[in-house]
Image: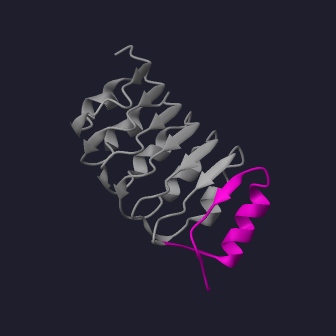
Amino acid sequence: AKLKTLMLHANQLDGIIPDELGQCGELENLFLSENKLTGGVPVSLGKCAKLKDLSLSENQLAGPIPDELGQCGELETLDLSTNQLTGGVPASLGKCAKLKDLRLDANQLEGAVPVTELAALTALVQLALHQNEGLTITASGVQTLKEALPNAKLYLPTEVAG
């Protein structure tokens, strides 16, 4: 219950991420990247109110990004890149006002980028949404993000009309 940091990246771990991690109320840092993890991103991680860094990149995770991650108000880094995640970018991530680094690139995300919500993340220094073939953003959406996040590096999907 008092676990603050769990660093198990680059260990060839396989299987699913246990839901029980959501019961770690003091958890601040969870690094499980560069493994062979499958299944989805546990919805229960949304209960980790003190979570600052969540890195699950370079695994084989599938399914949607849980809306519940938007409840992680202390989140500064969210790296879910290089997986097989589907669905859209949750607008609820716009509630994570302390986010500095949001990396959802190299997945199978689709739909429109929630520009208004992401533009509210004024602490962002990096926003990586590229390499998601089904993800779209309009030219006006790109402009909105550039104006709202002038200091952030933006890696965006291909622009579409509209």
Residue 118 in the magenta stretch? The answer is: no
Residue 10 drawn at (x, y percent): 37, 32
Looking at the rendering, the stretch of residues picked out in magenta corresponds to: 135-162
Which residue is at the front of the view, 156 or 66? Answer: 156
Q: Is residue 92 left or right of residue 97?
A: left
Residue lying farthest to the left in this orientation: 15
Residue 144 in the magenta stretch? The answer is: yes
Q: Quadrant of residue 137?
A: bottom right
**Residue appearing at x 70%, y 76% in the figure:** 140
Q: Quadrant of residue 30?
A: top left
Residue 55 drawn at (x, y percent): 45, 38
Residue lying farthest to the top in this orientation: 2
Label total for image:
0
100 relative to 83, above or below = above
Which residue is at the front of the view, 35 or 80? Answer: 35
Which residue is at the front of the view, 160 or 130? Answer: 130
**Residue appearing at x 64%, y 63% in the figure:** 116
In the picture, the quarter occupied by the C terminus is bottom right
**Residue appearing at x 74%, y 70% in the figure:** 143
In the picture, the quarter occupied by the N terminus is top left
**Residue appearing at x 49%, y 38% in the figure:** 72
Residue lying farthest to the bottom in this orientation: 161
